[in-house]
Amino acid sequence: MVFVGMDHGTTGVSFTILDDEITHFKISREDCSSGKISAIKELSKRVDFNSIDLMAITYAMGDSLTAVTPIEKVKNRGIISIDGAGKVTGGGTTVYDEIKDSGIPTVVIPGIHKKTPCLDERFKAAYSHHASSEKVSICYNALLETGFQNMIVSDISSNTVTMLIEDGEIKGAMDACIGAMGIVHGPLDLEMIRDIDDGLKTANECFSNAGAVKIADINTNVSQAKDEIIKKYLENDKNAKLALDTMIMTIVMEIYGLAGIAKNKVDGVVLTGSTGSMQEPIDVFGAIKKYIGCISPVTMLGERSGSLGSAQIAKAVFEGKKDILGIPVVK
C-alpha cells in the first residue's frame, strides 16, 4: 500500500511517500510558479501513480473546508480568498491543479477556522482564522509520534502557529497574524495599524514584515530570510541577536497562554518547523525548551512533519478513520 502527503508550505511544496520506505522531496515555490519544475513529474519519478492508494494534500488556509474532502468535491481549492495571506508566489496553485488533473485519488485537508467543528467555542468567537491546513497534518504527525492526547504543538518557521490539542482533538490555535513572531511574519502592532490607516502600507505588507526580519532589518526573499538572520547572528550583529531573542520570547508567551487555558494537564509540548527544530548553528529548540520545560516534557519533530503527517492522514482515511483530530472525513 502506498500513500502520499503534500505540505503546501511558505518556502516550498514538500512531498512524502509512505511505502516500504519513506521518501521525501521538496520543490521551491519559485520553481513551481515559473514552470521550471513540474511537481507531478517529480512525483512520477519516485512512485508509480497506479500504486498510490490515496494522497492527502494541504493548500493555503483551507478556510472554506470543514472536513477532509475528496478533491473532486472541493470548490475554489478549499479557500475563501488568497488575499491577505502573506507573500504569494502561485507555486502551490500550480501544484494543486496538477494533482487534481492527474487522476490520483486525493483528499484535501482543511485549515482551522471558526467553522471547524471540534474547536472550543471561545476560540471560534475570538478569531475567524486559526491555522492553515498543513498545521492539521503537523498535529496528526505529532499525535502519532508522541502518543500525547493533550499537547501543545508550535510550528516555527517563516511564521509561528501554535495549536492546543485536548483529548486527541484540536481545541484552539493562535495564527501568525495575532500571536507570536516567526522569521518573516508576525502580529500587527499599533505602529503598523497607523501605517495602514495612513495608506503607507497594506495590512499584508505589514504582516509579511512583522517577524524577526523587522528587528534584524532584513529585506529579502522568504526562502532566504532565515539564513540571512543566522549569518548576521553568527557575526555578532546585535539586531539579529535581538530579533531571535524577541521571537523566542513571543513564542514562549504564546505557549504559556495556551497552557494556561487548557482544561487538561498538558502531556507534552512539541516544537517543529525549520526554526523550531533547529539546534545548529543556533539552538533555538534548546532556548525555547529552557523556558517551557516546567509546563511538561518538551520534544521536537523534524521539519518534514507537515508532508509526513499528510501522508499519515491519507493512510488513516483510506483505512476508514471517520475523523482526524476531531475534524470529520467526507467520503
Image (tube, grey):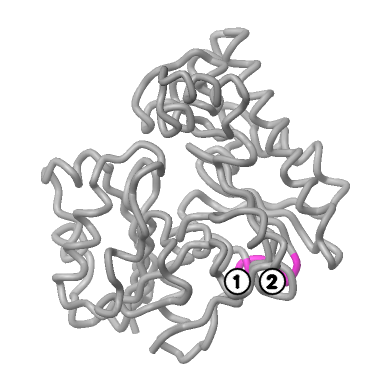
| Residue indicated by mark 1 | 144
**Circle 2 residue:** 147
In percent of the image, x 35 and y 36: which residue is there? 87
Residue 30 location (% of width, % of height): 23, 38
Reply above or below: 129 against 84. Answer: below
Is 302 placed left or right of 251 in the picture?
left
Q: Which mark is residue 247?
A: none
Residue drawn at (62%, 24%), measured in percent from left and top? Answer: 190
**Callout 2 secondary element:** loop
Say which element carries label 1.
Answer: helix
Residue 237 against residue 206 in the figure, above or below: above
User: In the displayed structure, would residue 161 be above or below residue 136?
Assistant: above
Task: Locate residue 249: give its quadrant.
Answer: top right
Q: Tell me the kind of residue under disc 2.
A: Gly
Report the number of discs: 2
325 or 4, nearer to the observer: 325
Q: Which of 40 and 183 is in front in this view?
A: 183
Tell me the crowding category of disc 1: few under 14, some 14 to 19, or many 20 or more residues within 10 angstroms, Cα based. few
State the image quarter where residue 204 is shown. Answer: top left
| Residue for point 57% across, 48% down | 175
Contact (Cβ within 8 Å) of mark 1 with mark 2 = yes
Examine the structure image and report whether residue 145 is included in the region drawn in magenta: yes
- Horizontal side, residue 99 vs residue 261: left or right: left
Name the quarter where the C terminus is drawn: bottom left
Q: Position of residue 186 (x, y in %)?
A: 55, 33
Please state the extent of the stretch shown in magenta in the rendering.
Answer: 143-150
Question: Quarter holding the N terminus?
Answer: bottom left
